[in-house]
Amino acid sequence: MNLEKLYEIIRTSKYSNSHGSGDPRLFYAGLAPIYFSLIYSMISKKCVCLGSGDGFVPKLMVSAQSELIKEGLIPAYDVTLVDANLSGWGDRFYGDFIEGYPEINIVNEKTDDVVQSFDNISYLHIDADHSGEQVYKDLCNYGNRMQKNCWAITCHDTCHYNHTIEVYNSVKRWAKEMDHDLVNFPVGMGTALIMPKHYHKYGTDFFCYNLIKEE
């Protein structure tokens, strides 16, 4: 992990503090290393982000894939940000591109409208419409587009207060219905991690072999 690059992303992303990063009082990265490590450790070939204030998580996706490319573990960048910018979180920071990150493919559409464009997603981050109904819908729609056996989904804004309780309840509901593992990180505005239970049957060797050899 390139720590200098990591802190550059934190410093230059306006909403990194909502992920527990960027506290001016501390040299603290918050959840940034978690996002990076998930992508890197799983050798994630295809990363998709639904909604993002200032592109914080997509930038980390690019950073992690950059290391994987250098090591010959994946052939090229595959990072997509889907954001219709209905609430205005993105228009001040990105339009058709994110400055300094041409690797990020930006799709200015609603998440419902483009779900059929994706398949075999390795890592998915959800931070779009925060209503409980839409979070659950995004999980149902995109959860069916994940690659087989080995994947991870993170969902932002899962702390147990104000509007975020709807997000957390929807995440918990979907994970329980699908019998997936769930852990919630109470850092910043909170991030939940969902992974398939059957991953534990195979272990790291199968994990890496499957992702490198698949397709």
Image: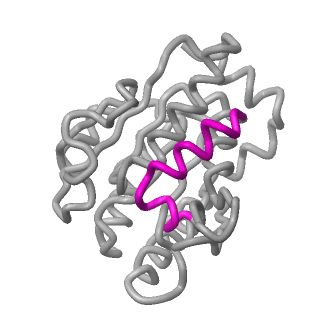
Q: Quadrant of the N terminus?
A: top right
Q: Is residue 47 magenta?
A: no
- Pick whichever, 24 or 131, lies toward us: 24
The residue at the far front in this view is: 25
Question: Residue 107 or 167: which is nearer the viewer?
Answer: 107
Q: Image point 17% across, 45% down: which residue?
A: 109
Identified at 57% across, 72% down, the residue is 188
Residue 80: percent from left, percent from top: 36, 34
Left or right: 89, with 196 as reference point: left
Q: Is residue 182 above or below residue 82?
A: below
- The correct choice, above or below, for 132 with respect to 194 in the image is below
Residue 85 appears at what percent x and percent y? 19, 55
* Residue found at the far bottom of this picture: 162
18 part of magenta stretch? yes
Instruction: Write down the quadrant of residue 24 in the picture.
Output: bottom right
Kindly report the secondary structure that dominates the magenta region of the rendered protein.
helix
Residue 92 at x, y percent in the picture = 22, 53
Residue 147, compared with residue 181, is above or below; it is: above
In the image, 181 versus 69, the foreground residue is 69
Camera-side residue of 208 and 27? 27
Q: Which corner quadrant of the image does residue 215 belong to?
A: top right
Please report the residue visible at 67 percent of the width from the left and 51 percent of the height from the top: 34
The x and y percentages for residue 50 are 35, 50
Q: Which stretch appears magenta?
A: 1-19
**Residue at 62%, 42% in the rendered image:** 6
